[in-house]
Image (tube, helix red, strand yellow):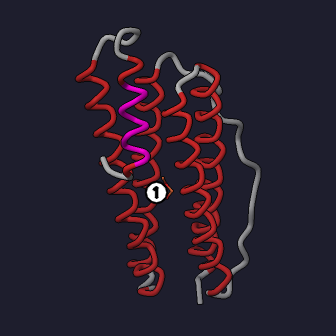
Amino acid sequence: MLSENLTKQLNTQINHECFSVVLYTQMSAWCASKGYDGCALFFRMQADEEKQHMEKLFVYVLETGGLPQLSEIAAPPSSWDSVRDLFQATFDHEKSISAEISALVEIALDEKDFSTFNFLQWYVSEQHEEEHRLKSILDRIDMITAEGHGLFTIDREVSRLTSSGNS
Ligand code: OFO
């Protein structure tokens, strides 16, 4: 049975995952509007993954006697200065999600709620993977450097990584 505090914190995380869905969907729209189809696909897939993250939390709260509670989602930004800027914003966003997950793990441990602690380990691994994937993309963008000349290559590279599921 979840404590009132953990129920509240997990509900906050459900809403943060919802924001990630909206953010990545908007990022996908920006990419598509610029003709960066590989990046657009990447962000559509990211948005789908975030929906799964949200649903996993939603079901866990329900199964442990809590009431999932959705709240207002802020509007995401709708444009970025460059593809690099877009991926940097994504990396920063994922790092902030990792910090939120760590804070939840800490609360679960403090409360000796080992079921929730165990449940959250999936998110700990997932965040590790996501940060690694985004850092790899940023590294490749930096290697390719000169945007304008390199954009086609960047887009193709992101598309390749998206379809292989590798970093
Ligand atoms: Fe990509 O973050 Fe969800 O958990």
Depth check: give the residue in front, 153 or 85. Answer: 153
Depth check: give the residue in front, 7 or 94. Answer: 94
Q: Where is the N terminus found, in terms of image quarters?
A: bottom right
* Residue annotated with mark 1: 100
Answer above or below: position of 123 versus 100: below
State left or right for residue 138 relative to residue 8. left
Judge whether residue 100 is colored magenta. no
Q: Locate residue 4: give its quadrant.
A: bottom right
State left or right for residue 138 relative to residue 88. left
Q: How many marks?
A: 1
**Magenta-tinted stretch:** 154-163
Residue 144's x, y, as percent?
27, 20
**The residue tagged with tag 1: helix, strand or loop?**
helix
Depth check: give the residue in front, 153 or 62. Answer: 153
State left or right for residue 159 relative to residue 30. left
* Residue type marked 1: Glu
In this view, which residue lies farthest toward the bottom?
1
The residue positioned 40% from the left and 54% from the top of the image is 99
Answer above or below: position of 128 versus 44: below
The residue positioned 31% from the left and 25% from the top of the image is 141
Residue 57's x, y, as percent?
59, 71
The residue positioned 64% from the left and 77% from the top of the image is 59
The residue positioned 27% from the left and 30% from the top of the image is 140
Q: Locate residue 111: give its quadrant.
A: bottom left
Answer above or below: position of 165 versus 161: below
In this view, which residue lies farthest toward the left?
143
Label 1 beta carbon within 8 A of ligand 1: no
Answer above or below: position of 83 versus 10: above
